[in-house]
Image (cartoon, rainbow, N blue to C red):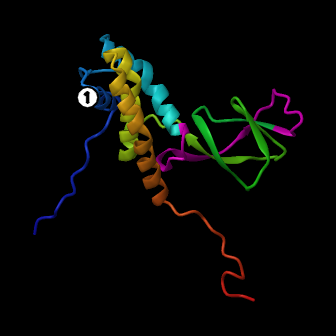
Amino acid sequence: MPVEMTPIAPPVGEVTICNLALARIGATAITALTDTTLEGVQCNLHYAATRDALLRSHAWRFALAWVDLVEYEDGDPDPWAYEYTLPADFLRFVSTEPPPTPFEIDGQLLRTDEDSMRIHYVRQETDPDNFDPLFIEALVVSLAAKICMPLLHDKVLQQQLADELPGAISRARLANMQESKPQTKTTWLDAGGG
């Protein structure tokens, strides 16, 4: 009996995402982000910043990471007791372990009174193969809105894309939240005691 195979989605690269955005506005496709065409220049200019802004806007499951921070020895953490270097791919803070821990973030440094610090954070995920399909859709709409005016000078289309963007982001966030369950601690009373 033959085994039924589930089709594997083809890889989605940065150029594919840019071409989806270009297609949304009716512009010419590119073959690389380094294309010297106006489309290539605009995609290269806006892609990474648009991706990072969207990543930073929410705790996307595909971009979450845990890290034990390394103490920064050369700084002056005053009024805090300790200063730690954030990871190079840090985009957004999510939580600490153990929670709750008072802290402040200043640039690439985290200051606290804790003598060790483990954080959960949104990392700068650069591999589109790891993106959720609904995140890609929101990224495409956002990128299309940014490159629309420089390429087409079409304010009406740009406004249509800007109006569409909140819905695309909301759908992506909702799917992201529905695919995880917040951790809850069962207390003695919750378990039927007392």
Is 82 placed left or right of 136 in the picture? right
- Where in the figure is residue 80, as x and y percent of width and height? 86, 38
- Where in the figure is residue 128, as x and y percent of width and height? 38, 37
- Quadrant for the C terminus, please: bottom right
Residue located at (53% from left, 63% from top): 181
Is 35 placed left or right of 91 in the picture? left
As drawn, which residue projects farthest toward the front? 156
Disc 1 packing (10 Å; few <14; some 14–19; many ≥20): some
- Where in the figure is residue 119, as x and y percent of width and height? 67, 47
Q: Nearer the viewer, residue 163 or 99?
A: 163
Where does label 1 land, which residue? 23
Residue located at (37% from left, 46% from top): 134
Q: Nearer the viewer, residue 33 or 28?
A: 28
What range is drawn magenta here? Answer: 56-82
What is the tally of numbered marks visible in this picture? 1
**What is the quadrant of residue 105 in the picture?**
top right
Going by the numbered disc 1, the residue's amino acid type is: Ala
Residue located at (52% from left, 33% from top): 53
Q: Is residue 177 visible?
A: yes
- Quadrant for the N terminus, please: bottom left
Q: Is residue 35 visible?
A: no
Determine if the magenta segment contains residue 67.
yes
Q: Nearer the viewer, residue 150 or 35?
A: 150
